Amino acid sequence: MTDNASRTILLLNGPNLNLLGTREPEIYGHDTLEDVQELARTAAAELGFQLRALQSNHEGVLLDAIHEARGTAAGIIINPGAFTHTSVALADAISGVSLPAIEVHISNVHQREAFRHHSYISPVASSIIIGAGVNGYKLAVEQLVHLLQK
Ligand code: DQA
């Protein structure tokens, strides 16, 4: 891994998270995707890391980004959105690249519909942050850096 890669965090947001700020604000709050990415980028910078952020509504784009993280990032923070509850492929990609991954959900999925209670990602995530609102992204950066520095 290059020096640059070992100080880089990949932040992935899945489907519909581009709508943050206007999407069901009573559940997801008023911060936009840009706000969330900036929050995470600032938290990373404070810890000496850079952050590369990508949002996609397409599972394959997220898969490619996870594959490309190998050799270009030290770890992954991912809010897979609804793919959390459907995607074996994303889980396989995360375990396939052998990088630490933090799963983030803005809302407390366990207080919501039953179909949101199961995650394909949780078994392959190093840590999971659920229901902390957008502050969960900051916590995820801190936790990932903590794991990387162990
Ligand atoms: C979410 C929870 C998912 O169930 C939902 O499909 C999302 C967002 C969250 O951040 O709370 O898109 O991952």
Image: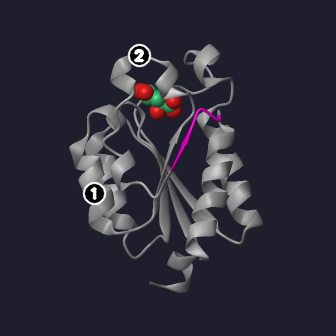
Residue at image coords 59%, 77%: 150
Residue at image coords 30%, 42%: 120
Say which residue label 2 marks. Answer: 113
Q: Tag 2: residue type?
A: Glu
- Residue 60 lies within the magenta run: no
Q: CA distance from mark 2 to mark 1?
A: 26 Å
Give how far across and how far down residue 122 sits, in percent: 39, 46
Q: Tag 1: residue type?
A: Ala
Give how far across and how far down residue 44 sits, in percent: 68, 61
Q: Magenta residues, as a range?
A: 128-132
- Tell which circle, 2 or 1, labels the residue nearer the N-terminal end: 1
Majority secondary structure in the magenta region: strand
The picture quadrant where one finds residue 125 is bottom left
Q: Residue furthest bottom?
A: 2
Task: Check the image and report above or below for 16 versus 91.
Answer: above
Give how far across and how far down residue 127 sits, in percent: 50, 54
As helix, strand or loop, the secondary structure at mark 1 comes to helix
Residue at image coords 57%, 33%: 106
Name the residue nearer the viewer: 135 or 49.
Answer: 135
- Residue 129 lies within the magenta run: yes
Image quadrant containing the N terminus: bottom left
The picture quadrant where one finds residue 136 is top right
Say which residue label 1 marks. Answer: 93
Q: Residues within 10 Å of mark 2 (few under 14, many from 20)?
A: few
Name the residue nearer the viewer: 70 or 102.
Answer: 102
Count how many numbered circles sit on residues in the image.
2
Res. 59 in view:
yes
